[in-house]
Structures are given as structure tokens and as C-alpha cells.
Image (tube, helix red, strand yellow):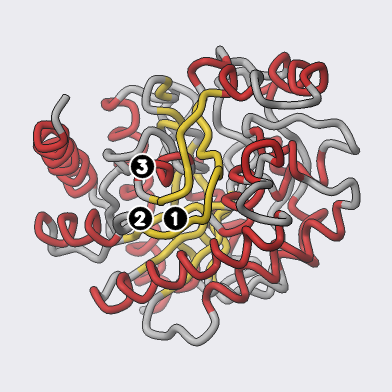
Amino acid sequence: IPHEEFQRLADDAVRHAVARQEEAGADIVTDGEQRRDNFVSFVATRLEGTCLMTLLEMLDIIEDKAGFERLLQTLDVPAYSISNATCFGRISRRQSLAADDARFLQSVTRKPIKVALPGPYILTRSMWVKEASGAAYGSKEELGADIVRVLREEIAELVELGVDFIQFDEPVLTELVFTQGQTRTFMCAALSARKDPAAELDFAVQLLSSVVAGFAGTRFGLHVCRGNWSRDESTLLRGSYDALAATLNRMPVQQLVLEYSTNRAGDLMRSAAPELGLGVVNPRTDEIESVDAITRRIERALEFYPPEAIFLNPDCGFCTFANRPMAHDEVAAAKVRAIADAARKFRGADDSRRR
């Protein structure tokens, strides 16, 4: 469809998503990422030097076809339905990654807003495909330097707009520590990972540190999960955040946004970050979590954090790919409402205790 028609439809979808969040009682709202095909590959439409390729199309250019086919076999979704932003030239911003979207979001709500961006590590890993990227960049690290530059340009715009919360999504960090050398990921990002997980984790810290250095006035968060592409929990990664504790404690962010409503996440971890974005509902089920169940998770988090440092979230997004939602609109709204109801209940109880 024409660009103007898409934007009109997307504007309406954002208004709808914001209205549902406000009706549910959310304190901080997003635009629902309505203009993105998924949380990371959408950058292909906004960056020079990239193209959007399905994993099936990538099979044509990958030298290790047998290894890539083994990766595809781990997926619980058809390879043609997953798209990846692949670097084939020098990258630069064709348009903003999120600032224009944030401007529109600010025009339809008076609430504080959160903008999510793919983190520099997942962008570097997923965009670097040697067979396509090697002509423009000599290494993944060289590409990473340009990704840092692009993200810093974007953050400067978002900070100037007064965006309240910028969240970086880095889900593949868990893949480094939970796979024990076995490639098991829904992103082709596995193609560019070193065999040494420690080196990759150091690289991730270096990239994010370079991205946020010198910025002030905006809350920065880091979201890490174990995959969100399937309702079949057995296909998703499992393991405690303790395996990533040393790395997460080095990340220069105010808040860690972590999933905890699934038992795959293990017990709650205390980190060096002053705030916790506590995952309290599972976006991959139709069951609406009870207020009591959410409140119990809050009580557990209070053993590590003061009340004002705990933010409540779904574990991850309600839709990983545009054509593969994890939850129906009504289910997503009900889960957000349960979160808001639990927050109100806890605030009331906390006020009573203080009095």
C-alpha cells in the first residue's frame, strides 16, 4: 500500500493501543510498536545499507547452508515468516528509528512514554552476515562502531523530545549462557557469535556503554528475556539470570527490565541497577494472572528493592512478529489491567502500613 496509507493506518493503530493502555490504567505508555514488523528487523526500512530478508532467503547466501538449516529446524515458526535486517553496505539513518514515532505518541497521550530500541549488540550480531556485509565492513566490530553512532544520533533526538524512558532490547544475551554451545535462537544473530561467550558479553557491555555515554535526563533500561516467539515453552531458553549477573551489573542503565512470570526465569536476582522492571504476566498465555498472584511477585521483589524502584511489566511484548501475535488484543489489555490493579492494591496497602 502507499506510504501515506500505511501511516494513516498505523496512526489509528497507535491511538487504539494507547487508548487500551490508558483504559487499563498503565502509568507509562508505548505506541505498541505498531509501525514495526518486529522489535529489531524494522530498522531495515529506516537505515541505509540494509535490506529486509527472510531467514529462508538468507539460506541462498550463507556459505554454511547445513549449519543454517540446523538453526532453522529449532524454530517453532516457518522460516519465511521471520525477517532479518541484513547489512550489505555502509549504514546511516535514512530516517529516525523511533523519534518520529515518539513525536506522534506524545501528540496522543499526556502520560509519560517509553520508547524501545533494539540494543547495539543484537543489532550488530543480527545485521552482520559475512557473505553480505563483508564488502562494506572488515569485521563485525567495525559495523558495531557505526551502529553505536546511529543509536547515539537517535538518542540525542529522543532526549531532546523529553522521552521519559528509553529501553534497549538485548534478548540474545541469554542465548550466550543458556545454550551450552548449542545454537538455539530465533534470530540469525547466532551466525556471527564468537565461540567464547565471555568475549561476546564483554562486547555487549562495551557497545551499550558507548551508546549511552554522556546522556542525561532520561531513564535508560535494558530488557533481557529468553525468547518470545512461541507459546511452546519447551522451545524457549531456560535459566536463572544469575548466569548473567556479572554482565548485567556492568551495564550502564538505571533499570533492568526482566521476565519473572515464567518459571524458566528462576528466582529473582538482586542487581547493581537501582531499579527493577519486574515481569509479572506472561504474554504467551491466554490466562489472566490474578491480582493476588502479581502482588505476591511484588512482595518477593520488595526483599531486594524499595517500592519506588519497582516497575511492573509483562515479561516481554505481546507480539514478537507482526504476523504472529502471542496474545489477542483483548487478552493483552486484560493482562495490563491486572498489572495496574495489582499496583493500585499494593499502593493502597503500602499507604495503610505507612500510616
Name the residue located 37 percent from the left edge and 84 percent from the top edge: 217
Q: CA distance from mark 3 to mark 2?
A: 9 Å
Quarter of the figure with residue 144: bottom right
Q: Position of residue 329 (x, y in %)?
A: 28, 27
Q: Earlier in the sequence, mark 2 or mark 1?
A: 2
Task: Say the numbered circle drawn on residue 35.
Answer: none
Question: In what element is the residue under mark 1?
Answer: strand
Name the residue that disc number 2 marks.
97
Tag 2 near tag 1, CB within 8 Å:
yes
Q: How many marks?
A: 3
Which label number is shown at residue 45? 3
Task: Say what amino acid the circle numbered 3 marks.
Answer: Thr
In the visual, does 256 lie left or right of 269?
A: left
- Point out residue 180 in the picture as x, y percentages from the top left corner: 90, 38
Q: Kindly indicate the quadrant of the structure image that contains residue 323.
A: top left
> Which mark's residue is nearer the viewer, 3 or 2?
3
Circle 2 crowding by C-alpha within 10 Å: few under 14, some 14–19, many from 20 = many
Residue for badge 1: 117
